Image (cartoon, grey):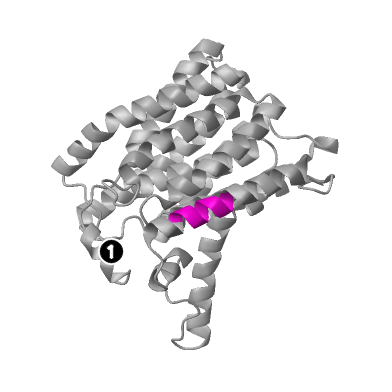
């Protein structure tokens, strides 16, 4: 298994690192630059027109790695084994496509507004519904009595046995929420990628314990690809991942949680994503309730810390470090 992990990570790292510069040059040539919101931190304006949609480079690296290792393991075919192996990749790519449409619309409109919230939500719900149905058909979901699906509560040894329709609605909500949470986290150089690395290491290790080959290969490839992407995305960023990349990563994180059959682990290991989302909800609610007052200096919360004087690198190191600690604590919680 360790050999498979190293091969998957190495292929994804090398391919992402090698294709980085050509992809950035192409994005610059096509003038696919990020439009910076005027309501954001003023010092972010110097990032105006930095190439976006750079998520393509790690999406390519992960996909090729999965296909290459899948060929070595002989999992190709139309059977449920093949579907189960590639299920998380398919979810992530589907969300990456939603992000691409959103990014493309922003570029064409020359503003930071692509798909409408309703359009994006409908696409996200449809993708999540198809994914969780495929995962069930492939036999990856933990079964319960009378066709129910088991939902483990981490650290308790207790399982809730939910009817399929209830579990599917829960899964759709959780996947869509996680997808948008990771998207919100992608607000400063290197943050989303750096936070996602320890999360994917955690889920990959859990998949190893379960013998879940598809999740092991996908998680390993994602870690390798993101480490290579940070060569170009760490502050000062030469490229942004765009919604293309952040929605792909949101699908990747949520997909891994369901592939290992323990989606509630998203709460502790994905605490940073959760905090980013909650900060926005609280800010908007407080603003409306108090007729114009703000709870934070700016939301999502990484901007609050910026306004407090933290540099981007400090925020990235603290948020990624906190995630690594929470992943370690979660590991001891379930074992």
Q: Is residue 255 visible from the viewing direction of this image?
A: yes
Identify whether 186 is placed above or below 96.
below
- Mark 1 Cα within 10 Å, few/some/many (few <14, many 20+)? few
- Residue 7 x, y percent position in the rendering: 49, 19
| Secondary structure of the residue carrying numbered label 1 | helix
Residue marked by disc 1:
44
Identify whether 276 is placed above or below 83.
below
Q: Name the residue at the bottom extreme.
A: 291
Q: Nearer the viewer, residue 7 or 294?
A: 7
The residue at the point 46 percent across, 88 percent down is 291
The C terminus lies in quadrant: top right
Q: Is residue 121 visible from the viewing direction of this image?
A: no
How many numbered badges does the structure rendering display? 1
The residue at the point 23 percent across, 39 percent down is 24
Segment colored magenta? 316-323
Residue 232 left/right relative to 94? left
- Residue 269 x, y percent position in the rendering: 62, 49
- Residue 157 x, y percent position in the rendering: 84, 44
Q: Is residue 321 magenta-colored? A: yes
């Amino acid at each position: 298994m360790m050999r498979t992990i190293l091969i998957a990570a190495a292929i994804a790292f090398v391919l992402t690192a090698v294709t980085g510069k050509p992809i950035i040059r192409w994005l610059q040539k096509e003038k696919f630059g990020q439009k910076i919101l005027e309501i954001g931190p003023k010092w972010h304006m110097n990032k105006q027109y930095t190439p976006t949609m750079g998520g393509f480079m790690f999406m390519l690296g992960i996909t090729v790695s999965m296909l290459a290792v899948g060929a070595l393991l002989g999992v190709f075919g139309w059977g449920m084994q093949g579907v189960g192996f590639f299920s998380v990749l398919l979810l992530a790519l589907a969300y990456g496509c939603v992000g691409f449409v959103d990014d493309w619309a922003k570029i064409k409109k020359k503003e930071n507004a692509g798909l409408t919230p309703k359009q994006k939500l409908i696409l996200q719900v449809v993708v999540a519904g198809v994914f969780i149905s495929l995962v069930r058909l492939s036999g990856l979901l933990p079964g319960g009595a009378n066709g129910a699906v088991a939902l483990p509560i981490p650290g308790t040894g207790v399982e809730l046995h939910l009817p399929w329709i209830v579990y599917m609605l829960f899964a759709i909500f959780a996947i869509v929420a996680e997808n948008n949470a990771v998207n919100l986290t992608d607000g400063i150089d290197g943050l989303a990628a750096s936070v996602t690395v320890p999360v994917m290491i955690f889920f990959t290790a859990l998949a190893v314990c379960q013998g879940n080959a598809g999740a092991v290969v996908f998680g390993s490839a994602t870690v390798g690809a993101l480490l290579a992407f940070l060569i170009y995305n760490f502050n000062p960023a030469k490229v942004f991942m765009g919604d293309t990349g952040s929605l792909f990563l949101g699908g990747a994180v949520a997909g891994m949680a369901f592939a290992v059959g323990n989606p509630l682990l998203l709460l502790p290991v994905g605490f940073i994503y959760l905090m980013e989302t909650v900060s926005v909800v609280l800010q908007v609610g407080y603003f409306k309730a108090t007729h114009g007052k703000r709870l934070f200096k700016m939301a999502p919360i990484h901007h609050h810390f910026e306004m407090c004087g933290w540099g981007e690198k400090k925020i990235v190191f603290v948020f990624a470090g906190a995630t690594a600690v929470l992943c370690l604590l979660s590991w001891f919680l379930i074992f």
